[in-house]
Image (spheres, helix red, strand yellow):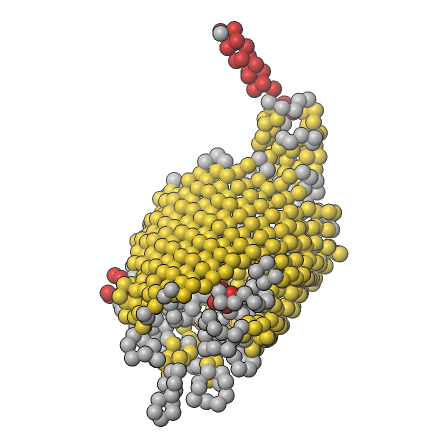
Amino acid sequence: MKPFLLMGILFFTIISFSQTMISGKIVDEKNNPVFNANIFIDGTYDGATSNSDGDFSFTTTAEGNQTLVISVLSFEIKKLEIVMNKFQNKTIILKRIATELNEVLITAGTLESGGKSRVSVLKPLDILTTAGNPGDIVSAFKTLPGTQIVGESGKLFVRGGEANETQTFVDGLRVAQPYLQTTNNVPTRSTFSPLLFKGTSFSTGGYSAEYGEALSSILVMNTIDEPDLEKTDIGVMSLGTSLGNTQKWKNNSLSVNTSYINLQPYQALLPDNIEWIKPYQSIGGETVFRQKLDRGLLKFYASYTAANFDLKQDDINYPEKIRTQNKNNNLYSNLSYKGGFGTNWNIFAGISFAKSQNSGIYDVYYYDSSENASHLKLKFVKPISDKIKTSFGADYFYTNFSESVTNFNSGYNSNIFAAFSETDFLFTNNLIAKVGFRFSKNYLLDESSIAPRLALGYKLAKNQQFSMAYGTFEQAPKNDYLKYSTNLQAEKAQHYILSYEFNKDKQIFKAEVYYKSYDNLVKYDTKSPVFNSNFNNSGTGYAKGLELFWRDNKNIKNLEYWISYSYIDTERDYANFPKQATPSFVADHTLSLVTKYWIQDWRSQIGATYTFSSGRPYNNPNETAFMDGKTKSYNNLSVNWAYLISPQKILFFSVTNVAGIKNVYGYNYSNRPNSAGIYKSQAIVPTADRFFFVGFFWTISKDKKTNQLENL
């Protein structure tokens, strides 16, 4: 056996010596690293993709003189004649395409965020350092133009659209249940922690053909591709505790964040206007696993929350308080791959799965509901020339919804297939056009459609440009309707947007006007949608408005601030409206001012947020005109203070609505008049006039200076 063993060792030794290591760094003409460049030996499958530092390495069995090909979007393809055993740790400089497609950006209807965005509006740390925002991604975006202050919901309402008209995507894949479960007039929050995301794209309209099933808006969040360092984050708060950890290895990394929330201690000290039987409790967490491959990146993301509460609320129609008990389990997960292949091809492939389970008691009724949803997506991107870039792909949505209320069952199964294509045309260095379409087939509604999309960007000067966008958008009716009737059609909207943007040296100004028309909105003939309602698609509507945004981090030392203003004129004839009117969640004018100031001598960051909105309409049955009432204006001043105890320890304090202003969101009226013929009313108010938060945060890392100040 020894001769065979020696021959085997010799054989594998020869093979190992026949492999050659190729390594280097890809940079641009300014010596900046180039990420996601495809590097391969021409005529072989041997290659790699550059990481965030521009570095790459791979082994190959090719010998002698070969051609090394380097390709990446927005750069000229480079071919190098190399000697295989002499090409290690080499720096390769790529030249940007003189008329690259990214020279002009189309920004109509879109607010980008993140360090790599050329039109950065909100950075990831803004989500957690904005006063009045309890670390919630959605709450931070409510300080941007185009959104409405709907405090009794906590969800995102955009440009006259209801919350269900905004879809959320994580790493390109839809999140079917982006909010935690709540009850009437008690605000909810999103299920995501900002700590794992590198940035977001918030489109208030006119978005890409890549995204569908959203009538008004999309919120696209991308998880961090590669963490900066290994660390552990510990938090002890007035509401609970949190623990996070990040580990890095050569080609992969893992981040985990967990939290436990319990309102009972807080309620014992500072009770609100809710009669809690059992205050809100939740336990959950998120994780991201990343695996670098030769020419791409594989990511797995998962989020899970288990929550419960039990409370009693006043109801104008009942002498006794109404009890609501709820147990919620919310799971979302996705697996995605992005990378390159061939000559300058890029691919994205992903699948997501979500499951939400709710059960409990409402008054005397027992309920149990479940929603399972999946999203599959495949997308290709290819530059045809230095002036034309195309992308195309397909996705598939599956939803299974079921509900049982005291032995009455309802539900549906939905399957939607879609295909999309978009092409960018660079006519000059100052003019770009994006033309696309989206085909959709809804098997539940037995309906097919083609939705065109068009966008233009024109560069006025180096830091100024105009953009416009047009598109047709559609969305299947929401669960509240489909669980009772599937004899409906998709709701539709058309968007027209014109915007101007100035972006220079830590300063951004954006002005935008828009018009939206609605068709096929669902109507019904009962007070609320129930099993015997008559549903139809005869609803219509419109929304038009002006939005302004200014952000400055330059002119005043240590001060960063932004101001946003929105004006909207909108009416709808939908739901059970007897005529076209402004919905109760819309305020004509909304203004937000956000400030953050660093005081070096105090080792502190102090923040303040002021929000104003004009009165919202409501229907008073004691008046003859429909939706003729108006609430008083909404005002809220919130502040926070982060004190740096030591380089890695922070004490954080915040107060929401410092002045304790008695805001009113609207009114509920009794179903029947009293003996005097008057319908009694009940104001819809915040659950508490003020909200206090105290937390201690400690970061443990090798550099002994990283902390959570940017995360608070």
Residue placed at 28% from the left, 70% from the top? 275
Residue placed at 30% from the left, 64% from the top? 310
Query: As rendered, which of 576 and 549 lies closer to the eye?
Result: 576
Residue lying at the far bottom of the rendered structure? 676
Tell me if residue 351 comes above or below residue 561 in the rendering. Answer: above
Tell me if residue 616 comes above or below residue 333 in the rendering. Answer: below
Residue 453, quarter of picture: bottom right
Q: Is residue 668 visible in the rendered structure shown here?
A: yes
Q: Position of residue 132 (x, y in %)?
A: 40, 65
Q: Position of residue 376 (x, y in %)?
A: 56, 50
Position of the C terminus, as image quadrant, is bottom left
Query: As rendered, which of 252 and 129 lies closer to the eye?
Result: 252
Residue placed at 32% from the left, 76% from the top? 314
Judged left or right of residue 249, residue 206 is: right
Residue lying at the far right of the rendered structure? 427
Q: Position of residue 43 (x, y in %)?
A: 70, 30
Residue placed at 37% from the left, 75% from the top? 685
Residue lying at the far left of the rendered structure? 268
Q: Is residue 113 visible in the rendered structure shown here?
A: no
Tell me if residue 554 comes above or below residue 389 in the rendering. Answer: below
Q: What count of labels does the image hold?
A: 0
Q: Position of residue 425 (x, y in %)?
A: 73, 55
